Amino acid sequence: MIKIFNTFTNQKENFEPLNFPKVKIYVCGPTVYDDIHVGNARSAVNFDVIRKYLIDQGYAVTYVVNLTDIDDKIISKALKEKKDFKEVSEQYINAYFQVIDDLKIKRADLYPKATDHIGEMISFIQDLLSCQAAYVSEGDVYFSTKKFETYGKLSKKKAEFLMEGTRAEKSELKKSPADFALWKSSKLGEPFWLSPWGNGRPGWHLECSTMIRRHLGNSIDIHGGGIDLIFPHHENERAQCEILTGVPFVKYWVHNGFLIMDGEKMSKSIGNILKAKDAIRQFTPEVLRYFFLSAHYRAPLNYTYEAIQACQVGLDEFQMTFARIEEVLKYASQNQGENLLTLKIFIEKAEEQFHSAMQDDFNTPQALAVLFDLAKEIRRLLSKTSSAVSPDVKIWLIKAREFLIKFGTLLGIVKELSEDIPQEIYEQAFMRACFKKESKYQQADQIREKISNMGFLIEDLHDGKFRIFSKGKK
């Protein structure tokens, strides 16, 4: 039984979908005014793994991620660059999908855009006005939070703190400071749509609520996003929907923790915002995914160069396991050779431990540890055997490889190997071996790093011998 932490109840709960085996998931996507940063990428990877594991467990998942393509920041960017807001949003939508694909994130079943649902948003507002949950004020429309008795229950905020984190609005037009805009009247030069209250555009919170109801219905299984969205965004989404439908909007609220940079929160004022596309250029997608998943999705994660480098080293060793297995499987033998049937015990234990970790609120650090421990054990056992092993041993090597590939692929950390190794790589490796023989270890390490930068791994064997493996395109 999968257990999942529910922000609403503040505890782990048994995962029981509203309509088994169907699971409806909505995750808040980007506001497309700029390239997404590594914090956004971490969230996308976390929910990608949650979705993939649920599918692996037999659930029929419908996964929706919205694109906020009209917003104050988009408008500001368009005015600054003297472009149409649609041009700006499309530019960064394309950039977003490039990062999603580079990080091997399975694309959502649907990416609804806010601007494609304006008519439905206007109807939503009219319904809220009809049940007196909203009011009009000089061309703007606001939601009356006092009308929703459990407002603040998701975020656990008391009334005097309900303005924390809210977006700037014309407070003089609101009946209560905690009320939030459903419709904003347009300013000169801004994009607008016609409505019964005048020219304007929808409020941020209304956009997600409308798209969820349109594509997934009044109630969904999982609503995901960053911890920073709990208030006001998700609190306001819940209020709008539940006051209208009278049924629970979301069964499980799931939020991922912050990613910080060298111990500090990412901030434009500090200048420490790292774009995801730049991180991908510096490291491989697999290394970034490994790093993101090395902490529990609800925990904060500190992005440092040293931490990423450690992930690179660990992943290189993990990848060597596949190459070592492939090498052994090339040879046939009728001899028993080294007895590796203990792999059967390790594999069965590893599978049980992997599922135990993932079913405990998607504990990816523990799941990764299971894979890496098995890979380490395989390398240890193979280091004690000759190249030729018996057919029964090969069966369990194949099973071990299949296990690592299946769940390594689910987590997105498995790289594709290339059989072609350029002559230059061999020449560099032989030169490194000579340096090592002469105890010139600094020069040898420099060559090893050069070989790594060229996309290959080198494994030292006994008596000065070595193996070279492709580790995929950097």
Image (cartoon, rainbow, N blue to C red):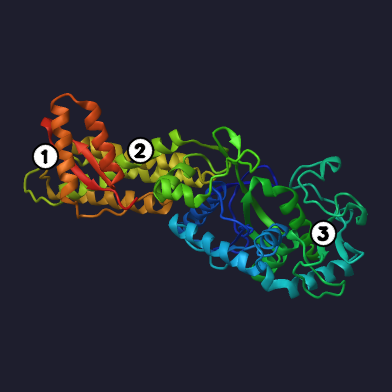
**Closer to us: mark 1 or mark 2?**
2
Question: Tag 3 or tag 1, which sits nearer the N-term?
Answer: 3
> How far apart, in angstroms, are the residues tagged by discs 1 and 3?
71 Å
Amino acid type at mark 1: Ser
Q: Is residue 400 above or below residue 78?
A: above
> How far apart, in angstroms, are the residues tagged by discs 1 and 2?
25 Å
> How far apart, in angstroms, are the residues tagged by discs 3 and 2?
49 Å
Is 116 situated left or right of 127 in this image?
A: left
Q: Examine the rendering and report whether any part of residue 1 can be seen.
A: no
Q: Position of residue 414 (x, y in %)?
A: 35, 50
- Label 1 Cα neighbours within 10 Å, binned few <14 / some 14-19 / many ≥20: few
**Closer to us: mark 3 or mark 2?**
3
Considering the numbered disc 1 on the image, is that residue within a helix, a strand or a loop? loop
**Closer to us: mark 1 or mark 3?**
3
List the residue tagged with mark 3.
Answer: 181
Amino acid type at mark 3: Ala
Is 417 situated left or right of 248 in this image?
A: left
State the image quarter where residue 287 is shown.
top left
Q: Position of residue 60 (x, y in %)?
A: 52, 65
**Residue at 24%, 36% in the rendered image:** 447
Question: Tag 2 or tag 3, which sits nearer the N-term?
Answer: 3
In the image, which disc is placed on residue 386? 1
Considering the numbered disc 2 on the image, is that residue within a helix, a strand or a loop? helix
Q: Examine the rendering and report whether any part of residue 473 can be seen.
A: yes
Amino acid type at mark 2: Gly
**Residue at 70%, 48% in the rendered image:** 230
List the residue tagged with mark 2.
Answer: 314
Is 231 situated left or right of 349 in this image?
A: right
Q: Position of residue 84 (x, y in %)?
A: 66, 69
Q: Is residue 126 above or below residue 393?
A: below
**Residue at 38%, 51% in the rendered image:** 407
**Residue at 44%, 50% in the rendered image:** 280
